[in-house]
Image (cartoon, rainbow, N blue to C red):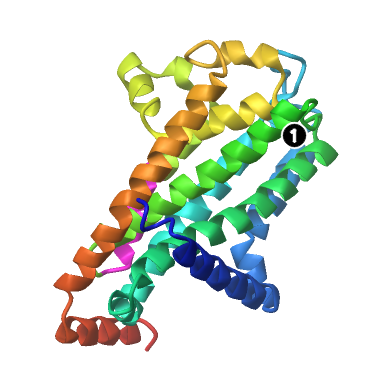
Amino acid sequence: MTKIFKSRTLRLGIERTRLELRAVIRDVNRLFIEFHLVNIALFVLLAVLLRDRAPLAPGGVSQVAALTVTFMLISIAQLGVVSVAQAVIVSREDGTLLRLRCTPGGLRVFVVEKVAYVVAVGVAVLGVLTVCGVAFTDLALPASPGRWVTLLGVAALGLATTAVIGALLGAVLPDARESLGYSVLPVFVLVLVSGMNVGDRLPEWANRLLDVLPFNWTARGLRSALMPDAMAALETVGGWQRPLAFAVLAAWAGAGALVAVPLLRRMTLQASGSDLARRREKAAARYR
């Protein structure tokens, strides 16, 4: 763990993140995709259509306002799990990870870069979703400094956690990129269940499973920052449990970062020149 967070590794990873962000901002097509503007537009559309029809939840907030957290969680999962897993698979196929393995600290810098990039972009996306929720629903901004700290802290930890999960997923998936779609399907089922807070309709064992995974704690932490306190009674544990949410997310992020680099190194050690050539041929064949 200490090697991952060495100052040189952090500095190089953040510098690579800065360069990547600058390249994205200068490319309109990438900006549209990377910042998930489709998700934001879909949320605004649903908010406008359902604003006068959605029933009220405890605390007087409409359920369409509560939908803001669901879209936040979807964006977090897409940015972290899907985007990072895709980046790992692409970097494996084009030989980038093999070259990084031969560079001192290269794989650690790669992990730091992906986590920092996801956190930077994700905070911006969640900020826009929050503003849209306030503008198009009866959602209110956090009313105290503590709630602001909760919102920013849970968002950053949730994004970092999903980023390392994406790195782990990309490291263990087989060569075919198509397998990613099947692999992330269960993730999005968990995201929707956690974001929509339907734990009261699930069996007890399913709720216990959700309480082990980071998605439920991310959603609960976001709700605790944005929703009225009266909605805490709807949680399966009967409260927000903010300190535990921070602890669970930090544990997932730390453990994931600890495991990600060895897994990526093991993956590259198993690769050979012929494997890389075969992957490049398969990748080229997709676009013929």
Is there any visible trace of residue 285 in the rendered image?
Answer: yes
- Residue tagged 1: 50
Quarter of the rendering containing residue 32? bottom right
Quarter of the rendering containing residue 232? top right
Who's the residue at 74% across and 24% down the image? Answer: 62
- Residue extending farthest to the right is 135
Viewer-proximal residue, 112 or 23? 112
Measured from the top left, where is residue 144 in percent x and y? 78, 26
Measured from the top left, where is residue 193 in percent x and y? 47, 31
Quarter of the rendering containing residue 273? bottom left
* Secondary-structure class at tag 1: helix
**Against 5, is 278 above or below?**
below
Q: Quadrant of the C terminus?
A: bottom left
Which amino acid type is marked by label 1?
Leu
The region drawn magenta spans 176-187
Measured from the top left, where is residue 203 in percent x and y? 35, 16
Task: Give left or right: position of 199 versus 23.
Answer: left
Viewer-proximal residue, 253 or 135? 253
Helix, strand or loop for the magenta stretch, by majority: helix
- Magenta segment: does it hold 177? yes
Task: Give left or right: position of 145 versus 34.
Answer: right
